[in-house]
Amino acid sequence: MKLFKLINIVLLSFITAFICISCEKLVEVEIPNNQITTDLVFQDAQTANAVLAGLYAGVRDNSLLAGDKMGPHLGVYTDDLDSYSPTATNGIYELYQNQQTDINALIYSNWTSTYQQIFIANAILEGVQASASLSTSERTRLKGEALFLRSLLFFYLQQLFGDIPYPLSTDYKINTTLPKTPAFDVLQKLDSDLQESISLMNDAYNNPERIFANKKTAQLLLAKVYMTQNRWSEAEIVLNNIVQSPLYSFENDLSKVFLKSGSHILWQLKPKNPGDATKEASIYYFTGAVANNYALTADLVAAFSTTDQRKQKWIATVTVGPDTWYRTDKYKNRLANTTEYSIVFRLEEVYLLLSEALAKQNKIAQALPYLNATRQRAGINPIISPVSQSTLLNEILQEDRREFFTEMGHRFFDLKRTGQLQVLTAVKTHWQTYHELWPLPQKELQLNPNLNPQNTGY
């Protein structure tokens, strides 16, 4: 693949850039007085931590996890967002119309930028492995977090593209000819990698703002892998472990859910500069006509009852003359932001996944409290027994939508995990079964024929 050859540079060239991440306050790292040679990059904890901080910054700014990537791209791809892109040649417009092709610019960008971060994660893992001077605790922590971040990126690539290459080194001679790893095997590899990551990480956060992953963050990702594999009982065990942790408590005030200080947050990404708004606060915001922006679909707005407080607190109404639109209003600080970071994982997801895992095992009574927690916080009536398994699972899916709209592509992944993507045919004119996967980028297929065949339908 071209991108691996392009970024097959010595570690020195990107460590220099990543040391500058200290200016972003991800981690305080002073620039060493003397020039660092490549073989010394991972011999010093200060520079090794700078590379890891750079990886977190890359995940925030230039991967599928960036606030302006999966949220809007999958929001328009499913039924949460309408796109008012001014041109049919725009990549987002094709996603909105479910008419994407293998030359779609946004799909290619999501693929390449995410694999760039995987390359850096692999560089960290190789550097830590080769280091003779890092302390055992530093080696353990760096490896654990790099493994988690790499697994996170692989997971979302697998969900979007199915069979994908699974590079484990920085050797472009190997990476440029890698064949695809079957989706089933990718999930198996993620299980193994995450088990190792969890064994290396601690529950205690390295930063009180929870901007670096901890053991529980990796456990939640492992539970998501298990849910994707229909391993309900194993997911239940992992999710229960998170719920029972004293680190987290359910946030009962809707107005505080997206504040950075919440104890319901497992992991969040800090904006690049002090005072910057989150990408989510910026990309969804409009006050006049909706041209060039995203608006919530009528179908999504109709999913909220009149008593659901999330409709009042998390959705804003914009009226211009005879026209009315709705925009997401979860992140509110757009100027001099000091209170909001981009939340990746929060406890509400643990609750709803646990409710689903229990319901799948027909443990109805045990599942209900975890579903009802977010419902009752929003001011809507709880689901009470007796309730059938199918009804409960549908209620969980609907609650997922109301709770997580425009967050990290939740709607697409929830529909896919539950085998419900076909519901999109009712509101998406061009939706087809094969749209459960995106096409592999044509440029990558041309550079590496081993990636063939193309995904079905493209």
Image (tube, rainbow, N blue to C red):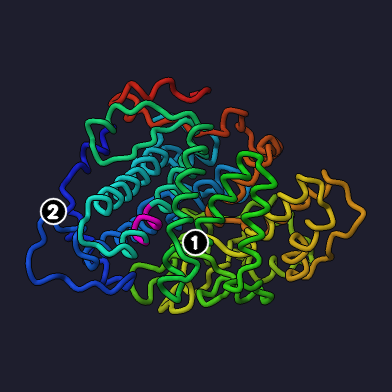
Q: Work out whether mark 2 precedes mark 1 in sequence or the reverse, and give the earlier one.
A: 2
Q: Residue at x 43, y 20 (%)?
A: 453
At mark 1, the secondary structure is: helix
On the rendered structure, is 458 left or right of 359?
left
Distance, label 2 to label 1, CA atoms, is 30 Å
Question: Where 280 falls versus 100 (above or below)?
Answer: below
Place of residue 131 in the rendered image (x, y in percent of width and height, measured from the top left)? 22, 55
Q: Which residue is drawn at 35% across and 55% down?
A: 143
Magenta stretch mostly in which secondary structure? helix
Q: Name the residue under label 2.
A: 38
Place of residue 288 in the rendered image (x, y in percent of width and height, measured from the top left)? 52, 64
Question: Where 368 falls versus 98 (above or below)?
Answer: below
- Judge the density around disc 2: few (<14), some (14-19), many (≥20) Cα neighbours within 10 Å: some
Question: Where 317 falls versus 64 (above or below)?
Answer: below
Q: Residue at x 42, y 76 (%)?
A: 335
Q: Which of 42 and 323 is in front in this view?
A: 42
Q: Is residue 418 magenta?
A: no
* Residue 324 in view: no
* Residues shaded magenta: 141-146
On the rendered structure, is 208 left or right of 56?
right
Question: Where 62 falls versus 228 (above or below)?
Answer: below
At mark 2, the secondary structure is: helix
Q: Name the residue under label 1.
A: 215
Q: Nearer the viewer, residue 361 or 264?
A: 361
On the rendered structure, is 152 left or right of 33?
right
Q: Nearer the viewer, residue 85 or 397?
A: 397
- Judge the density around disc 1: few (<14), some (14-19), many (≥20) Cα neighbours within 10 Å: many
Place of residue 239 in the rendered image (x, y in percent of width and height, measured from the top left)? 64, 57
